[in-house]
Amino acid sequence: MQRIILIVLSLVLTACSAEQVYDLSQGVRRNECSKLADSDTRERCFQSADKDYQHYLNDQQDKPY
């Protein structure tokens, strides 16, 4: 988890776009999904990790704050 935070922080500090940071974090997440033993849980994890940035933004706009 600390590794992810450091990667994201370093990218933000080097002026990466939000979409680039999102794409990187999704790659890390897919890697974590591959470690799950249960195939159903792993598949759901991959489906969530494969959501593109635009779909992610649309989902975020639909959530009440």
Image: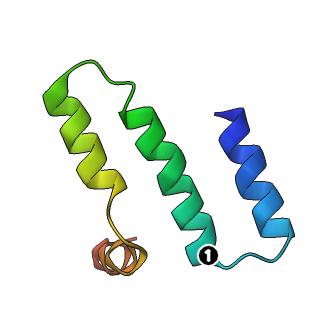
Residue farthest along the left direction in this orientation: 40
Report x, y in % for residue 57: 40, 78
Residue 53 lies, with reference to residue 41, above or below; the image says below
Residue drawn at point x = 63 percent, y = 33 percent: 1
Left or right of 43? Residue 24 is right
- Element carrying mark 1: helix
* Picture residue at 25% right of the left edge, 33% below the top: 42
Q: Front-most of 28 and 12? A: 28
Q: Is residue 57 left or right of residue 38?
A: right
User: Quadrant of residue 15 in the image?
Assistant: bottom right
Find residue 62 and report its image quarter: bottom left
Where residue 55 sits, quadrant-wise, is bottom left
Q: Residue furthest right?
A: 13
Residue ID for mark 1: 18
Type of amino acid at the residue the image marks with label 1 = Ala
Give 30 or 54, whichever is nearer the viewer: 30
- x, y (%) of residue 20? 61, 72
Where 62 sits versus 5, above or below? below
Residue 14, placed above or below residue 37: below
